[in-house]
């Protein structure tokens, strides 16, 4: 299984912090945001490689970061060639680029590299193995304005997705989907097909939404909390929370 990290965004809402530096490498609690994710994922059964997709503007930062890492599994960096936010490829095109670069497809855990979690991906991978399908994570979101800014799904009693909408004006449910997906290798091969079929390229969940209309896709309800770092205020909140967490664990 491949861990594919989407890290080619420009994080304009965090300027000037991210004007010349990638958001996934910003410090939280004494280490980069990206390390909070990989420290967990690198230990999970089945993971073989970490593939990180950057843009051309920030690739050297990831190269410098990579030189300092000592994970059990290899890290591969991919450069999507873009130099600014206006010319970004978009998350789904970045995924397609990675699949092409890797050659033979494998089961793939796709994650956004700018989040911090207080739980492990272990149960998510176990859920996917039990269901035998591609899967997404989900959590309850009761705020209508937040529902309208994210992906919302509905599921049946077996956690099979029955509807999937990106930023719906009138949500059918309250299950929000964060940017964490588990794709079977046969589904990974369909990313280019999805783009040709009109799948949105920017939001990473666009491919999951398209796929859920073609094949069974299940949803795993998160057992903890995800901390999305979207702007300066949310970044400072996460730094404060996980700084305290780090101090407690040192003691």
Image (cartoon, grey):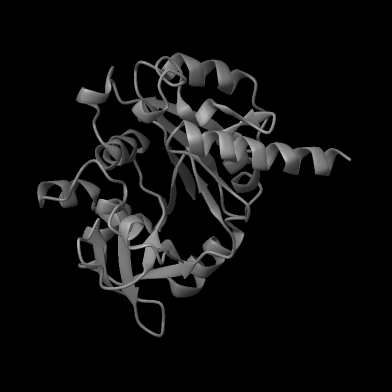
Disc count in the image? Answer: 0
Residue at the image point whose x is 42% and y is 27% from the top: 14
Q: Position of residue 1 (x, y in %)?
A: 49, 50
Q: Nearer the viewer, residue 224 or 36?
A: 224
From this view, report whether residue 22 is shown above or below residue 174. above
Residue at the image point whose x is 37% and y is 37% from the top: 102
Residue at the image point whose x is 66% and y is 42% from the top: 241
Q: Position of residue 50 (x, y in %)?
A: 51, 38
Q: Position of residue 125 (x, y in %)?
A: 53, 61
The quadrant where residue 152 appears:
bottom left
The quadrant where residue 30 appears:
top right
Residue at the image point whose x is 41% and y is 18% from the top: 58
In this view, the residue farthest toward the right is 251
Q: Nearer the viewer, residue 200 or 103?
A: 200
Can the viewer see residue 241? yes
Q: Position of residue 189 (x, y in %)?
A: 27, 51
């Amino acid at each position: 299984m491949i861990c594919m990290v989407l890290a080619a965004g420009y994080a304009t809402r965090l300027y000037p912090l991210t004007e010349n530096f990638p958001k996934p490498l910003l410090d939280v609690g004494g280490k980069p945001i990206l390390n909070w994710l990989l420290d967990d994922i690198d230990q999970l059964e089945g993971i073989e490689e970490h593939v990180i997709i950057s843009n051309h503007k920030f690739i050297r930062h990831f190269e410098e970061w990579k030189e300092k890492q000592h994970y059990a599994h290899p890290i591969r960096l991919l450069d999507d060639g873009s130099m600014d936010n206006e010319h970004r490829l978009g998350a789904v095109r970045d995924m397609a680029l990675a699949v092409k670069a890797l050659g033979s497809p494998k089961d793939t855990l796709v994650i956004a590299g700018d989040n911090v979690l207080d739980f492990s991906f272990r149960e998510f991978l176990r859920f996917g193995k039990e269901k035998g399908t591609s899967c997404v994570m989900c959590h309850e979101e009761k705020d209508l304005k937040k529902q309208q800014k994210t992906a919302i799904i509905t599921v049946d009693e077996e956690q099979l997705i029955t509807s999937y909408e990106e930023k719906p004006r009138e949500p059918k449910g309250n299950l929000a989907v964060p940017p964490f997906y588990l794709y079977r290798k046969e589904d990974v091969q369909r990313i280019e097909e999805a783009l040709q079929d009109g799948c949105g390229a920017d939001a990473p969940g666009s491919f999951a939404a398209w796929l859920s209309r073609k094949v069974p896709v299940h949803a795993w309800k998160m057992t903890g909390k995800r901390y999305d770092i979207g702007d300066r205020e949310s970044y400072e909140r996460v730094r404060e929370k996980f700084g305290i967490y780090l101090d407690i664990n040192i003691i």
